[in-house]
Amino acid sequence: MSLKKLSKKQLAEQQIKEDKKFRKKIFIWFSFLIIALTISYTLYFYWCEIKFIYHQSTLYGKEVPASLICMSGDELERHDSKEFVFNSSSFYACSRNCENKIKHHSKEFAFVADAFTGDIICKANAIIGLKDKGSPKVIYFKNRESFDKYYEQLSSKTEQDNE
């Protein structure tokens, strides 16, 4: 009799151990599923903001594609801007309102001073860069040479400030 009771006791202990292992595996997989769903949700709903922050931090000192900015507000945008043609030049705007600003007030919104030389240039033909690191404000350059000189000047100035 004691052998049967002992084997039933061992069987019960073994069943308890297996149940604990199963619960542990279920808990791990459920936790993994929750984490995966949270990451997916975040990427799906906040993709534009994540991409915007990435562009803000990585495009400083590099040429910014015109499709990423609104030429009316001179800022980096969260969504790609819409291209439109005005006076045989391609401009980019984030909305119909900004497009109308450029069309109806072209002296104010379609032309800007080169950030390095100060020459007046058309935004449609300009090379675009970020004004400050981590800032959405953009500046325009007449050519690649003034673009490069501007950022060289800023980098040498920051090196001098650091020393």
Image: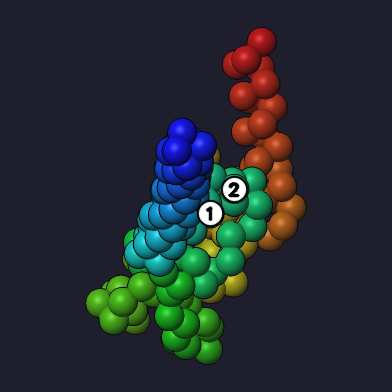
Residue 5 lies in quadrant: top left
Tell me if label 1 and label 2 are in contact, CB under 8 Å: yes
Badge 2 marks a residue whose secondary structure is helix
* Vertical order, 108 against 26 (above or below): below
Residue at the spot x=44%, y=85% of the render?
Answer: 84
Task: Please provide percent x and percent y for residue 74.
Answer: 41, 59
Q: How many labels does the image show?
A: 2
Residue at the spot x=43%, y=80% of the render?
Answer: 82
Residue at the spot x=45%, y=38% of the render?
Answer: 1
The colour scheme used to paint the residues is rainbow
Q: Can residue 86 be seen in this view?
A: yes
Q: Can residue 75 be seen in this view?
A: no
Q: Find disc 2 in the rendering and name its residue.
A: 58
Give the numbered dot on residue 103: none
| 72 vs 25, nearest the viewer | 25
* Vertical order, 141 against 19 (above or below): below
Task: Please provide percent x and percent y for residue 31.
Answer: 42, 49
Is residue 58 found left or right of 3 in the rendered image?
right
Task: Please provide percent x and percent y for residue 116.
Answer: 60, 46
Question: Which of the image's four quarters has the C terminus?
Answer: top right
Type of the residue with mark 2: Thr
Is residue 128 found left or right of 24 in the rendered image?
right
Residue at the spot x=71%, y=43% of the render?
Answer: 149
Q: Distance between the residues labelled 1 and 2?
A: 5 Å
Estimate how packed mark 1 is, as few (under 14), some (14 to 19) or many (20 or more) residues with alpha carbons within 10 Å: many
Badge 1 marks a residue whose secondary structure is helix
Q: Residue furthest top?
A: 163
Task: Please provide percent x and percent y for residue 47.
Answer: 43, 62
